[in-house]
């Protein structure tokens, strides 16, 4: 997945945001299979269990079997057809979600070779906020950041000052 570039800035800011709101004594269910960032969380002292690759649109049993205080969903909600159902099924009291934001100058991402690596949703910040509100979550904190790339052109220039990522910490109402 990160053969050409590793998202150092995104991972650094995500870890700082996580550490700001979650104590290492809390248990975390990280949506998605084990990945480089879940390994970073473990190295930082967090107790993390990942989902096993099940299609969360069709199967939310993990929320019935895993009892954790926190659910994290870093860069996964854009891949889901029905994040509403998942948000209503979560039993944990704390939630951290990060998403790539919809950019007016770039189409939604779609891998031609990997069916799992496609974006069904690319949210604007207000859309994720509304989704969380409708599913019983109160946003406590939020942050946005850019994703500059080392290329020449109009899109790389726009990426240097247009927010690309949005992260939210929410608690169950």
Image: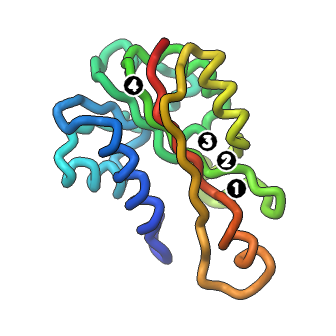
Residues packed near mark 4 inside 10 Å, few (<14), some (14 to 19) or many (20 plus): many
Q: Going from the N terminus, do you reach mark 3 or mark 2 first?
A: 3
For residue 101, above or below residue 106 = above
At 64% across and 57% down in the image, what residue appears? 164
Q: Could you say whether the residue bearing mark 2 is in a helix, strand or loop? A: loop
Residues packed near mark 1 inside 10 Å, few (<14), some (14 to 19) or many (20 plus): some
Q: Count the marks: how many?
A: 4
For residue 136, above or below residue 165 = above
Mark-to-mark CA distance, 3 and 4? 21 Å
Q: Is 99 on the left-hand or right-hand side of 106?
A: left
Q: Which residue is mark 1?
A: 110
Mark-to-mark CA distance, 1 and 3? 10 Å
Q: Which residue is mark 3?
A: 79
Q: Nearer the viewer, residue 18 or 85?
A: 18
Mark-to-mark CA distance, 1 and 2? 6 Å
Q: Is 51 on the left-hand or right-hand side of 137?
A: left
At 62% across and 60% down in the image, what residue appears? 113
At 82% across and 57% down in the image, what residue appears? 104
Q: Which residue is mark 2?
A: 119
Label 2 near label 1: C-beta < 8 Å? yes
Q: Which residue is mark 4?
A: 94
Tell us which disc is closer to us: 4 or 2: 4
Mark-to-mark CA distance, 4 and 2? 25 Å
Mark-to-mark CA distance, 3 and 2? 5 Å
Q: Going from the N terminus, do you reach mark 1 or mark 3 first?
A: 3
């Amino acid at each position: 997945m990160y053969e050409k570039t590793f998202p150092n800035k995104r991972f650094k800011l995500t870890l700082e945001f996580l550490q700001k709101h979650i104590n290492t004594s809390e248990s975390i269910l990280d949506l998605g299979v084990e990945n480089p960032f879940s390994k970073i969380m473990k190295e930082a002292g967090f107790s993390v269990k990942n989902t096993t690759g099940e299609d969360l649109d069709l199967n939310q049993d993990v929320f019935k079997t895993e009892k954790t205080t926190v659910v994290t969903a870093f860069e996964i909600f854009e891949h889901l057809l029905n994040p509403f159902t998942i948000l209503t099924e979560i039993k944990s009291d704390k939630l951290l979600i990060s998403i790539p934001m919809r950019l007016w100058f770039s189409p939604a991402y779609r891998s031609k070779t990997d069916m799992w690596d496609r974006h069904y949703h690319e949210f604007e910040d207000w859309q994720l906020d509304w989704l969380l509100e409708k599913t019983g979550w109160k946003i406590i904190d939020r942050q946005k950041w850019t994703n500059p790339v080392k290329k020449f052109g109009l899109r790389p220039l726009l990426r240097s000052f247009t927010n690309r990522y949005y992260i939210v910490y929410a608690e169950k109402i």
